[in-house]
Image (cartoon, grey):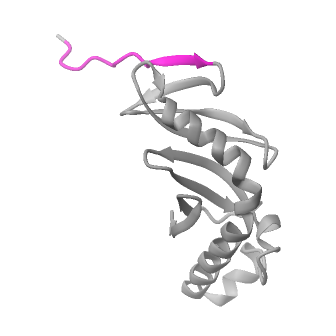
Amino acid sequence: MRLFRKSKKHTIEDPTFGNMEFRGGSWVGKVFFQPEGVELSVCLSGDEVGPNEEARQQWSTLDKRYQSLKPQIASALLKLYREHFALLDQKDLADDFPQIRTGEDVWSAFSLILIAVHPGRQFDLTYCFSGSNDDSLFVVSIKDETVACEHVGD
């Protein structure tokens, strides 16, 4: 007798986002993000049918506004980098971490890997170091088109 059944994955083929899987109230998948020219993970709010209309509209807004938000995002990433840098052993930094001095340096040092779209016009943009062995994740939250908060996680 089996006490637990492995539940079947609930997936859809979305016309905008491609193949997506429903996980606990959100739809997760991979999508090409034109403003950065990369494929990345996406997480959108929705129900069992698919991503909701609000999430779709927010995605469209971010897609159009991302370039204008980049200076604020760069400032937030630079701040996070400096905070992260201050916590680490200085001798490890020369080999493992890119040297970032200005907001412009940010774009060669970080890669956008995930965009989470939340209800209420909020996005979490998750970045990692490009080409580094460090597994730290740098999250910039945008609420109503301004950078609201940021944090570093592993």
Picture quadrant of residue 70: bottom right
In the rendered structure, the answer to whether residue 39 lies left or right of residue 138 reads right
Whether residue 138 is visible, yes or no, is no
Tell me residue 67's x, y (percent): 77, 57
Pinpoint residue 150: horizontal percent, then vertical percent: 52, 69
* Residue for point 71% across, 54% down: 66
Q: Residue at x 62, y 80 (%)?
A: 79
Residue 128 lies within the magenta run: no
Residue 98 location, x and y as percent? 77, 74
State the residue at coordinates (57%, 42%): 58
Question: Residue 34's image quarter?
Answer: top right
Relative to 69, 27 lies left or right: left
Residue at the (52%, 45%) spot, across then down: 117
Q: In terms of depth relative to the viewer, which is nearer, 23 or 91?
A: 23
Q: Is residue 67 left or right of residue 145?
A: right
Q: Is residue 124 above or below residue 38?
A: below
- Please identify the residue farthest to the top as the structure is shown: 1
In the rendered image of this protein, does residue 113 appear above or below residue 51? below
Residue 25 x %, y %: 37, 33
Instruction: Write down the region rendered in magenta.
Output: 2-14
The secondary structure making up most of the magenta span is loop
5 part of magenta stretch? yes
Look at the image and tell me whether residue 39 can be seen.
yes
Out of 152 and 25, give the one closest to the viewer: 25
